[in-house]
Image: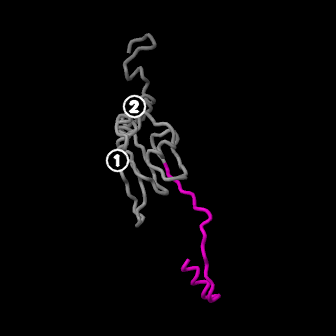
């Protein structure tokens, strides 16, 4: 308002502007990782991390609820990360989760994989799709599927 008044005053002295907010810009949160539908969700009201996860659909069985991370920009535009333990709340062990926080515009909620899920992916990628795709299973397990001796 001050800047607009100063610019008008330079061209037309004595003119003042009164600004009225008609519509607020939409605010969004991004939910990634082990949720039903990762993506961008509009914040239409004050929203917590658990509510944002609920907007992203069902939980994935491989989700690590003890290490949910919320990324946000600080006042100096540095990226900050906050780790939340939401497992107690999601399994009704803690009815009032201390770790649940209010989200801001453009926050990113990341629901990571559990360690066992990460190991499963490594096995799938390097053993099942890697080794087994290069060498036939019969050779690896020394199986005789043709009726001849190896």
Specify whether 8 is left or right of 92: right
Q: Quadrant of the C terminus?
A: top left
Q: Nearer the viewer, residue 98 or 56?
A: 98
Closest to the observer: 35 or 49? 49
Q: Is residue 125 above or below residue 140?
A: below
Task: Quote the CA–CA distance across marks 1 and 2.
Answer: 41 Å
User: Which residue bears the numbered disc 1?
Assistant: 98
- Image location (x, y in percent) of residue 26: 57, 57
Q: Which residues are magenta?
A: 1-30
Q: Which residue appears at 40% of the width and 43% of the height?
A: 112
54 lies above or below 23? above
Which residue is depicted at the point 44% across and 32% down? 129
Q: Quadrant of the N terminus?
A: bottom right
Residue at position x 60%, y 87% in the image? 9
Q: Could you tell me residue 146's position as x and y percent?
A: 46, 13
Q: Which x, y percent locates residue 80?
A: 38, 57
- Mark 2 lies on residue: 127
Q: Is residue 7 magenta?
A: yes
């Amino acid at each position: 308002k001050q800047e607009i008044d100063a610019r008008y005053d330079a061209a037309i002295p004595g003119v003042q502007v009164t600004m009225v907010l008609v519509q607020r810009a939409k605010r969004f949160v991004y939910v990634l990782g082990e949720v039903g539908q990762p993506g961008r969700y509009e914040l239409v009201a004050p929203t917590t991390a658990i509510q944002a996860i609920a907007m992203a659909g069902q939980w994935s069985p491989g989700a690590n609820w003890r290490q949910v991370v919320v990324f946000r920009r600080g006042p100096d535009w540095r990226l900050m990360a906050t780790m939340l333990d939401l497992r107690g709340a999601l399994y009704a062990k803690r009815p009032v989760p201390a770790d649940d926080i209010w989200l801001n515009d453009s926050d990113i909620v990341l629901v990571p994989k559990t360690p066992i899920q990460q190991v499963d992916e490594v096995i799938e990628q390097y053993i099942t799709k890697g080794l087994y795709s290069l060498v036939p299973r019969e050779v690896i397990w020394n199986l005789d599927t043709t009726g001849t001796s190896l």
